[in-house]
Image: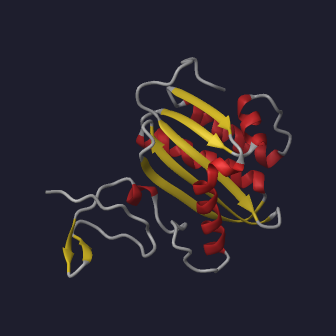
Amino acid sequence: MVSPLATAPAHYLIAYTDGGARGNPGPAGFGVVLQDETGRKIAGLSQYLGHQTNNVAEYQGLIAALEYAVERGPRALKVISDSELLVKQVRGEYKVRNPTLQDLHARARQLILQLEWFSIQHVLRGHNAEADRLANAAMDKGMGRGNTGTLGAHASATQLDREFEGIVDRGVIRLTNGDLPDGTRVQVRVKG
């Protein structure tokens, strides 16, 4: 399922994806951290999925990353996941036997075909910590455990990948061209 281009193009997205379910099946969520090819963070995505399995949550995270790349570009994506099952199924090394996963796998495959370049690799869990934190924040929020200080399911990707302007007023930044939900993490760059 890797596109014919063997090497990465000049511009591509890197998506660290993770999904989990407490109880498996149980309250589930996914987290995705998107970066450009230089490693600059572009967006964080997470969503509570209700009562699902770990594998369903892993696939939902992959699909969210693929949809982001297809809709916003560049249409080149490197996925990094700590789910060996997901990676090997997407690569075609393992068969997909579960009917629910077959549907999710088919959706992922449709999205991959819309990309100009695609790569997927497996990493150990310790190399996927930020996506794991987002997935856990989504599960916490969905289970009513309140705001954990990271992006929750309420913030959309469109809010995260645009630039906001603001003014500092008595030490507080007031946005002049939009609003962000409470708990959204931001980086501030001062312009002269």
Along the line of sight, which residue is nearer the eye, 73 or 8? 8
The percent coordinates of residue 119 (x first, y second) are 60, 30
Residue at image location 39% in from the left, 60% down from the top:
159
Q: Up-down: is 73 above or below 160?
A: above
Residue 124: image quadrant is top right
Residue 162: image quadrant is bottom left
Left or right? Give the position of 167 relative to 58.
Answer: left
Left or right? Give the position of 192 relative to 79.
Answer: left
Q: Up-down: is 188 above or below 68?
A: below
Residue at image location 46% in from the left, 73% down from the top:
183
Residue 106: image quadrant is top right
Q: Is residue 131 visible?
A: yes
The percent coordinates of residue 92 (x first, y second) are 76, 28
Left or right? Give the position of 52 relative to 119.
Answer: right
Question: Residue placed farthest to the right in the image?
Answer: 97
Q: Quadrant of the N terminus?
A: top right
Along the line of sight, which residue is nearer the eye, 161 or 191? 191
Count every numbered label the image shows and give the total.
0
Q: Quadrant of the C terminus?
A: bottom left
Q: Is residue 60 visible?
A: no
How is colour applied across the structure in the image?
Answer: secondary structure
Question: Residue placed farthest to the front in the image?
Answer: 126
Question: Residue placed farthest to the left in the image?
Answer: 192
Left or right? Give the position of 142 relative to 25.
Answer: left
The percent coordinates of residue 174 (x first, y second) are 24, 74
The percent coordinates of residue 85 (x first, y second) are 78, 41
Q: Up-down: is 31 above or below 107?
A: below
